[in-house]
Image (cartoon, grey):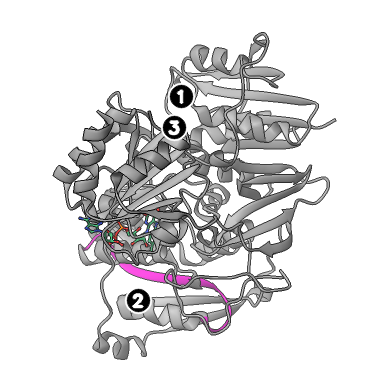
Amino acid sequence: MSKVLIIAEHNGVTLNQSTARCVSCALELAPDCIDILVLGSDCSGPASEAAGLKGVTRVRTITSEANAHPLSAVLAPQIAAVAPGYDYVLGPSTTFGKDLMPRVAALLGTGQVSDIMSVDGPRRFRRPVYAGNVIVSLEVPEGRQVVATVRTASFPAGAPGDSPVAVEETATDATIPTHTRFRELRTAGGDRPDLQTARIVVSGGRGVGGAEGFEKLYSLAGQLGAAVGASRAAVDAGYVPNELQVGQTGKIIAPELYFAFGISGAIQHLTGIKDAGTIVAVNKDPEAPIFEVADIGLSGDLFEVVSQLEEKLG
Amino acid sequence: MALHHMREVGLKTIMVCLKRVVDYNVRVRPKTDGSGVQTEGLKMSINPFDEIALEEALRIRERGEASEVVVVSIGPEDCQQQLRTGLAMGADSAVLVRSDEALDPPSAARVLLNMIERLEPGLVLMGKQAIDDDCNQTGQMLATLWGRPQATFASKLELSGEVATVTREVDAGLEVIEVDLPAVVTTDLRLNEPRYVKLPDIMKAKKKPIDTVAIEDLGIDTTPAFQVLAHTAPEPRARGRMVRNVDELLAELRERGLVN
Ligand SMILES: Cc1cc2nc3c(=O)[nH]c(=O)nc-3n(C[C@H](O)[C@H](O)[C@H](O)COP(=O)(O)OP(=O)(O)OC[C@H]3O[C@@H](n4cnc5c(N)ncnc54)[C@H](O)[C@@H]3O)c2cc1C
């Protein structure tokens, strides 16, 4: 009998796709049961989506005003109260899960496997270290609860189930601290496709030269139905907001098609795109390291290439 | 008394954790027998995120909001080099917890908790992740064991009385939270740009104290939570092809069925 608990990521309205990817990872553990735990001030939307995921046994909710925003110090004790009896507690390796899961692990007195990229057995996992330059295989000793984050780019989003499973409200007697308070969330948002789930991503680096240059990438992205991403250098220079950063310390993504315009190909950037289907690199420097990993390389001025692409696709 | 003191100089002590890691510019490879990574002779540095943490602590002290900055490292004797760099940047004193074995995040958090008990900091600053194991756990685990708040992935930090307001880089954008002090804050890349160390600072730093503690003397359980079986190289991506112009690029993309 092995049981998995997955901590749902959501925005109060919809379930983040990262949760479905955790379910795909959990299925590889061949467990007897997979429960999803939704914490929120109104769990109904995310819970009903979670209930429709294939492979899920049950959805549990903890509804409380305190859970209106995902504050780890608030959520972790409630998760730790529910966790006994589960062999695995999984969360996504997004900023939500990275912040939360170590807190859960510490409360449960165990360690955490960060960024599971593959499951080699019920207690054997692989994870990247050194910005993906080295892969570690590790084993969690028998009898130790496994707390882990799932590298979402390594697992598919999965299919919907045949019919939705039950949703049950759960009560805990966890003490909720008041030392951590939410103030605001500033998001550029808009109706552009989400960087983490888009089929095509158009990314720019320092070579794009500024916010005006990025307008051209946004326009091409619009034409392709693509999301826009960026290197750290482009974010640091203030061309685009932080949530667009792709890489070791930004988002790890796996689109079918990735365009790198004016990105040199630093290892910290490449680790964020190594699971992309096709990588296209456009760089005026024919020696740029990005060409070593690109499936298709074009040496030239990115602005000329972007405007020709727009014209020829249009 | 204590409260009066707090109001006058802000925090007494900021503890900053510095990890010695292979420099970010070096490409690391697994050992041929898979037992670890080849680090011999490689350039070692302060984990870049921890350097940002130290810079932030120094700025807080320089604004008069804290009176001292103590840097702490866990690792072999060679960590003295990174602590010296930290002292040259401006830290007031340093503690090395000497351990020849690399610790996993839960063990590191237990050791750092012990340091907190000794130093009684009003704020602990550290990088959001170390660029060697890329775990992104220690700060959160430390905050939990300490029973205090955490504010991870900080890109802005403001202190006012006994509260810190922290802007965090999250997937959706920027989140602002408020935490009561003491707390653990982990730093992201855009919090600041660390200062360069100048030669006179290096000379001055030679006189600053580094307190050394042997990890065995702390009586802390440092058994790893997991067993590492092997280190391997990632599957390489096959080298692709160069095209000469946009027409060839589009032809290739259409052949792969990626664009219309
Ligand atoms: C701890 C740490 C974490 C990091 N994390 C990340 C991360 O998560 N993500 C990330 O991306 N980086 C990260 N970095 C930074 C990384 O090391 C590189 O500095 C960064 O990726 C470089 O960005 P870039 O390629 O845009 O800039 P550059 O390296 O400056 O490259 C710009 C490229 O643009 C080309 N170019 C210029 N003009 C044109 C033109 N008109 N047409 C075509 N090409 C042109 C140039 O030839 C050059 O190759 C991290 C670094 C550290 C230390």
Which residues fall within the magenta stretch? Answer: B64-78
Instruction: Looking at the image, tell me whether mark 3 or mark 1 is earlier in sequence order.
Output: 1
State how far apart marks 3 and 2 are (Cα).
51 Å
Q: Quadrant of ligand 1?
A: bottom left
Residue B90 at what x, y percent from top left? 30, 76
Q: Amino acid at mark 2?
A: Asp
Local packing at callout 3 (Cα closer than 10 Å; few below 14, some 14-19, many 20+) is many
Local packing at callout 2 (Cα closer than 10 Å; few below 14, some 14-19, many 20+) is some
Question: Can see residue A218?
Answer: yes
- Identify the residue shown where x is 78% and y is 30%: A31
Residue closest to the eye, A312 or A82: A312
* A42 to A300, vertically: above or below: above
| Chain of residue at mark 1 | A
| Chain of residue at mark 2 | B
* B135 to B52, vertically: above or below: above
Residue A294 at what x, y percent from top left? 44, 53
| Chain of residue at mark 3 | A
Residue B211 at what x, y percent from top left? 49, 81
State how far apart marks 3 and 1 are (Cα).
35 Å
Q: Which residue is mark 3?
A: A199
- Identify the residue shown where x is 79% and y is 42%: A122
Q: Which residue is mark 1?
A: A66
Tell me the element at label 1: helix
Q: Nearer the viewer, mark 3 or mark 1?
A: 3
Q: Point out the residue furthest to the left here.
A: A212
Residue B67 shown in magenta:
yes
Q: Point out the residue furthest to the right here.
A: A1
State how far apart marks 1 and 2 are (Cα).
40 Å
In which quadrant is the C terminus of chain B drawn? top left
- Identify the residue shown where x is 57% and y is 20%: A62
* Rendered image: mark on residue B92: 2
